[in-house]
Image (cartoon, rainbow, N blue to C red):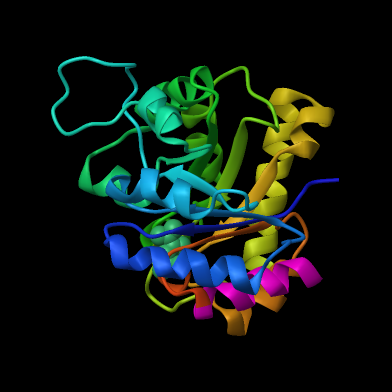
Amino acid sequence: MRRKLAAGNWKMNGTSESLAELDALRSAHPAPQVDVLICPPATLVTSAVVSVADHDIAIGGQDCHAKPNGAHTGDISASMLKDAGASYVILGHSERRTDHVEIDGLVRQKTLAAHASDLIAVVCVGETLEEREAANTLDIIAGQLAGSLPDVLNAQNTVIAYEPVWAIGTGKVPTTDQIGEVHDHIRAKLEQRYGEGVGRSIRILYGGSVKGSNADEIFAVSNVDGALVGGASLKASDFSPIITALEKA
Ligand code: PEP
């Protein structure tokens, strides 16, 4: 009942030459059986939207400001992303939380801004290695969900991404039991807060060193509805096997 989602986060990578990767993805997946999303840097959103015209690949932003407009040099609002043709926006990524000191309350404001502009918010949560080693993972995730999500949302405008900070870009991946434990916990928290119907329908992605070689086992875990992929989304040749694995899961 939950449509799977393969999402790529290009981070601060890519110039107009990288749009060739979107062409390659289109050719490799003319009619994907799962949702496919690419979040390029803001400079490429408009041209990426043009590149995927008439195809099911969606384009998203990697962040937005909490306010709709104003004196915020260097920032981009949700309505600007929407105007550029984006349909999703990643919010609360651990790199934003660390590099820009984004706290849960701000992520919540940004999520509201995304919803107000009719963007699907991909809200990221995840524990550090220290928090995991201190056996605090589930409490940390519950706290991030409670603080980062607004009181009203639905499965059409919100996706959760569980991204253990220590697994991002490191090649380290939690065991499938560890992933399953956190995804089941997130599902339970969503059902508790938003009711069973909404809580059961919200997609929960896993993110952190997902590759073609580990995608099958990760996608077999309960309550894993897809992936948020960094490094392995930059090249169509790396991302394509992940899409294929998700289609087969
Ligand atoms: C990410 O940054 O969202 C991510 C999961 O990165 P990577 O796949 O490179 O670990």
Q: Is residue 239 magenta?
A: yes
Would residue 115 be visible to someone looking at this image? Answer: yes
Q: Residue at x 63, y 74 (%)?
A: 28
Q: Is residue 47 above or below residue 238?
A: above
In which quadrant will I find the C terminus?
A: bottom right
Q: Is residue 111 magenta?
A: no
| Residue furthest bottom as drawn | 213
In the rendering, at what x and y percent does residue 113 appear? 44, 21
Would residue 167 be visible to someone looking at this image? Answer: no
Ligand 1, by image quadrant, is bottom left
58 to the left or right of 223:
left
207 to the left or right of 175:
left
Q: Is residue 101 above or below residue 212?
A: above
In the rendering, at what x and y percent does residue 43 appear? 27, 47
In the rendering, at what x and y percent does residue 68 appear? 34, 16
Q: Residue at x 33, y 57 (%)?
A: 11
3 to the left or right of 96:
right
Range drawn in magenta: 237-249
Type of secondary structure dominating the magenta stretch? helix
Q: Residue at x 47, y 44 (%)?
A: 60
Nearest the viewer among 207 and 195 is 207
Nearest the viewer among 15 and 123 is 15
In the rendering, at what x and y percent does residue 62 appear? 38, 45
